[in-house]
Image: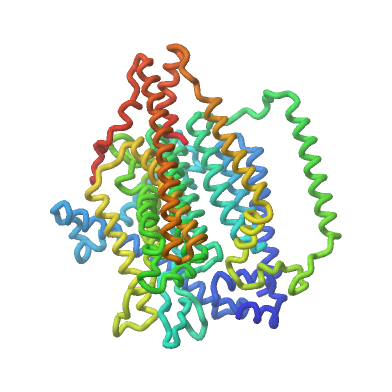
């Protein structure tokens, strides 16, 4: 069996998943369907990661994005009851569409430039001279994770820690901003209602 | 072995074959027909094993529960009622498949499969057997067996991310339940599915943190590697991680599986039938199947992670080496299956706020603290007795300080809540949140 054929098959199937999901996200009228389109896209990207030997990234992609973030999207959509089909012809923010078009074109231009530049770049020399990363050929199944760990917790430890601090600050800020402190009877009433749920919805 | 072969041999085979070798050693020489057939047979065996195992599990649960409730249980279809589940399944096949008027047609049809497929896929990464025993020269077999002259494992796939795949699939399983409830277009299923989602996301954190302790002691993600690291009883992760992660993991999986006492998702008294109220016929059967299959697969995961998988405590005479692993695996699996049934027969259902308190205020802090302690021991003590004691002492002081801060924060928030609820005209439910009496749930049939 021809392995390059297999590679192409995997690539195009996953690419179709990614693009189909992405088109679904912006065209489907029901928010829940759109969120499911996003899940399809994330799965396609995970397949591409696996095809590139980045197994750990693929797993984390599914666990974090598909398993937690989109689930939270869906959770909020269900809780707020905004799961009715939207009328896409009405635009609440007038400048949004032309602005989005410009941004989209800019992104396409940037990506094209990156691909053109990457094509002319020299491949890093390694053990095989075949463009294969050493991690993929050493046969050590955990080398992927080890390299990532050395990168994150060694070379970029400060950026990593600062990001986590940023996230904590954002979470604490959200709690402080959304919490209504009791000043008078009305606020206290609303708070008593919300405190029932605030203990449970984390 | 692999490296030399790839470098000397055909590098041109490239990424795909290399990736496959990591997943199953049977593909080492490239993709040939014999290995391909072996893989296909393994897929078939795992599929059939999954279905038959689920069938037996339903029977086992009904028999054991009825035994505990002093009644007979299923006894008409087949010997000792063994075929009762098959009869029920056939009945469900022929029942009318209702589609509610207000249902979301596509998602309603999709949801059972989203619940069912992940349940099946977890089987693929669990080592169901294999020879991990010690050779005469002191080396250990790495769990491979020989079939038709080919070396392979008694597990469908051994991907490098191994156990993370289980986490990923268990987080995908949330979708099935969540979308089933939403797509039904009815309020009780929606309530059930919102509960389920909150519960499963909450307990996934505790699950992942206790899993991290296992990974710390096994130093690998691959499931066969985790099994191989637990040679003797003292090397079992149950012992090396110090028991606590095991108990956290058991509680968290019980909640993940929505099994009693955490079965608020399908609390009959409150939610009619939970997320699957509107489902009937074969679609309901798929949910049912997924639920019971998840019980078996998660038990298998626990056996793999903490009890050494197919590794035996001693050599069983007569039985050849590679079957012995499977025998041990099934014995350990039955232990967990019985435990789940026992839970169901004895424990009353938790109330929702108790469930959330247990998850967020007990299990997550404890497993996080334990993980940090294990990491500190590994980093600073490394087997040295005096240094270990020092590390434990320092950890105890830090842990006590963190715990008292945590308790202070909890008491402040409780005071705030009570102050607010006394201002409100209607007394709030939150004042009763601290009572420890269990809800009036009953683990009925």
Across and down, in percent, residue B368 comes to 45, 49
- Of B181 and B69, nearer the camera is B69
For the point 57% across and 79% down, the residue is B33
- Of B14 and A17, nearer the camera is B14
- Please identify the residue farthest to the left as the structure is shown: B70
- Of B101 and B215, nearer the camera is B215
Q: Is residue B2 above or below residue A196?
A: below
- Please identify the residue farthest to the bottom as the structure is shown: B136
Q: Is residue B125 in view from this perspective?
A: no
Q: Write down the quadrant of residue A198 in the picture.
A: top left
Across and down, in percent, residue B325 comes to 37, 75
Q: Write down the quadrant of residue B10 in the picture.
A: bottom right
For the point 41% across and 41% down, the residue is B403
Answer with left or right where residue A128 lies relative to residue A177.
right
Across and down, in percent, residue A114 comes to 81, 51
- Of B27 and B357, nearer the camera is B357
Q: Is residue B387 in view from this perspective?
A: yes
For the point 18% across and 60% down, the residue is B75
Across and down, in percent, residue B159 comes to 54, 66
User: Quick one: quadrant of the N terminus of chain B?
Assistant: bottom right
Q: Disc count in the image?
A: 0
Q: Is residue B321 above or below residue B161?
A: below
What is the image's colouring? rainbow
Answer with left or right where residue A113 lies relative to residue A42.
right
For the point 30% across and 69% down, the residue is B331
């Amino acid at each position: 069996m021809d392995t390059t054929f297999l590679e192409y098959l995997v690539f195009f199937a996953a690419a179709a998943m990614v693009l189909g999901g992405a088109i679904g996200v912006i065209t489907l009228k029901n928010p829940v369907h759109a969120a499911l389109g996003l899940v399809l896209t994330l799965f396609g990207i995970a397949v591409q990661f696996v095809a590139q030997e980045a197994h750990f990234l693929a797993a984390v992609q599914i666990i974090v994005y598909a398993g937690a973030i989109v689930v939270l999207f869906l959770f909020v959509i269900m809780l707020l009851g905004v799961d009715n089909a939207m009328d896409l012809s009405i635009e609440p923010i007038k400048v949004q569409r032309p602005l989005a078009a410009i941004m989209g074109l800019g992104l396409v231009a940037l990506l094209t430039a990156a691909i053109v530049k990457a094509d002319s770049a020299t491949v890093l020399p390694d053990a095989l001279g075949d463009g294969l990363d050493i991690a993929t050929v050493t046969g050590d199944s955990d080398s992927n994770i080890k390299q990532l760990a050395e990168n994150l917790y060694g070379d970029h430890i400060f950026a990593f820690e600062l990001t986590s601090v940023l996230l904590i600050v954002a979470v604490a800020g959200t709690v402080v901003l959304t919490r209504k402190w009791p000043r008078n009877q009305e606020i206290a009433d609303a708070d008593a209602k919300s405190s029932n749920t605030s203990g449970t919805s984390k | 072995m692999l490296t030399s072969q790839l470098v000397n041999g055909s590098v041109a085979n490239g990424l795909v074959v290399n990736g496959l070798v990591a997943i199953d050693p049977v593909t080492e020489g490239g993709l040939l027909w014999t290995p391909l057939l072996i893989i296909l047979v393994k897929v078939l065996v795992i599929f059939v094993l999954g279905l038959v195992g689920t069938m037996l599990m339903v029977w086992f649960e009904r028999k054991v529960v009825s035994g505990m409730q002093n009644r007979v249980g299923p006894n008409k279809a087949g010997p000792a009622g063994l075929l009762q589940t098959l009869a029920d399944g056939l009945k469900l096949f022929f029942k009318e498949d209702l589609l509610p008027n207000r249902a979301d047609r596509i998602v309603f049809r999709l949801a059972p499969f989203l619940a069912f497929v992940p349940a099946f896929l977890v089987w693929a990464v669990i080592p169901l057997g294999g020879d991990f025993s010690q050779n005469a020269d002191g080396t250990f077999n790495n769990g491979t067996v020989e079939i038709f002259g080919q070396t392979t494992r008694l597990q469908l796939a051994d991907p490098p991310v191994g156990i993370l795949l289980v986490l990923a699939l268990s987080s995908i399983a949330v979708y099935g339940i969540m979308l089933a409830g939403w797509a039904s277009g009815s309020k009780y299923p929606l309530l059930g599915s919102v509960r389920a989602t909150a519960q499963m996301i909450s307990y996934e954190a505790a699950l992942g943190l206790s899993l991290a302790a296992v990974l710390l002691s096994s130093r690998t993600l691959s499931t066969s590697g985790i099994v191989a690291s637990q040679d003797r009883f003292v090397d079992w992760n149950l012992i090396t991680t110090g028991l606590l992660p095991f108990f956290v993991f058991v509680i968290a999986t019980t909640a993940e599986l929505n099994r009693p006492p955490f079965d608020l998702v399908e609390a009959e008294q409150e939610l009619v039938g939970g997320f699957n109220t509107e489902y009937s016929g074969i679609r309901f059967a798929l949910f049912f199947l997924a639920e019971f299959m998840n019980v078996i697969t998660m038990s298998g995961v626990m056996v793999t992670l903490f009890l050494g998988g197919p590794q035996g405590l001693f050599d069983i005479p007569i039985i050849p080496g590679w079957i012995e692993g499977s025998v041990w695996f099934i014995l350990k699996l039955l232990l967990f299956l019985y435990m789940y049934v026992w839970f169901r027969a004895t424990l009353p259902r938790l109330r929702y706020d108790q469930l959330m308190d247990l998850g967020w205020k007990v299990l997550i802090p404890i497993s996080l603290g334990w993980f940090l302690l294990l990491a500190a021991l590994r980093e600073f003590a490394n087997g040295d007795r005096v240094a270990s004691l020092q590390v434990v002492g320092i950890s105890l002081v830090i842990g006590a300080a963190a715990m008292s801060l945590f308790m202070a924060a909890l008491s402040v928030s409780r005071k705030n809540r009570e102050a607010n609820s006394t201002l409100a005209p209607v007394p709030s439910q939150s004042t009763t949140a601290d009572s420890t009496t269990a809800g009036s749930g009953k683990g009925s049939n």
